[in-house]
Image (cartoon, rainbow, N blue to C red):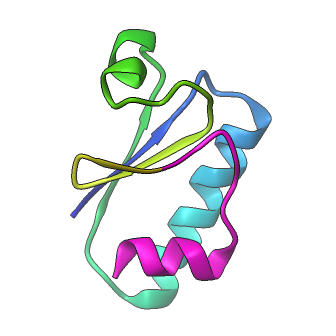
Amino acid sequence: MLVKILGPGCKNCQRLFQEVEGAIKEMGIEARLEKVEDLDEIISHGALRTPGLVVDGVLKVSGRIPNKEEIKKYLS
């Protein structure tokens, strides 16, 4: 599974990265977690606001930080 956090490195982007990283560990799943700061790539995923969460190429959330249960749902 490939998980991407979209954003310019802002505080909310960093927080989402940490939340997703924690959920991956809690769930015991194998996933590659990447930060994407390139504006063209962020837009190519359809994210008009950051932070964004992409799982296996599908934009799941844009413009907010989902709660831990939402994150786990997106990762399962």
How many numbered marks does the figure carry?
0
Picture quarter with the C terminus: bottom left
User: Does 10 lie within the magenta span?
Assistant: no
Picture quarter with the N terminus: bottom left
Position of 43 with respect to 16 (left or right) is left
Position of 68 with respect to 44 (left or right) is right
List the single residue furthest toward the top. 40
Above or below, 35 against 64 in this view is above
Quadrant of the rendered image containing residue 29? bottom left
Residue 72 position within the rendered picture, expressed as x and y whole percent measured from the top left: 49, 80
Position of 49 with respect to 36 (left or right) is right
Above or below, 52 against 32 in this view is above
> Residue at 39% across / 29% down in the picture?
46
Which of the pair 34/68 is nearer the observer?
A: 68
Position of 6 with respect to 19 (left or right) is left
Residue 24 position within the rendered picture, expressed as x and y whole percent measured from the top left: 44, 75
> Residue at 69% across / 54% down in the picture?
65
Above or below, 64 against 42 in this view is below
List the single residue furthest toward the bottom. 27
Residue 70 position within the rendered picture, expressed as x and y whole percent measured from the top left: 57, 75
Q: Which residues are magenta?
A: 61-76
User: Does 62 lie within the magenta span?
Assistant: yes
Above or below, 69 against 4 in this view is below
> Residue at 48% across / 21% down in the picture?
37
> Residue at 46% across / 80% down in the picture?
73
Residue 38 position within the rendered picture, expressed as x and y whole percent measured from the top left: 42, 15
List the single residue furthest toward the right. 11
Which of the pair 11/61 is nearer the observer?
A: 61
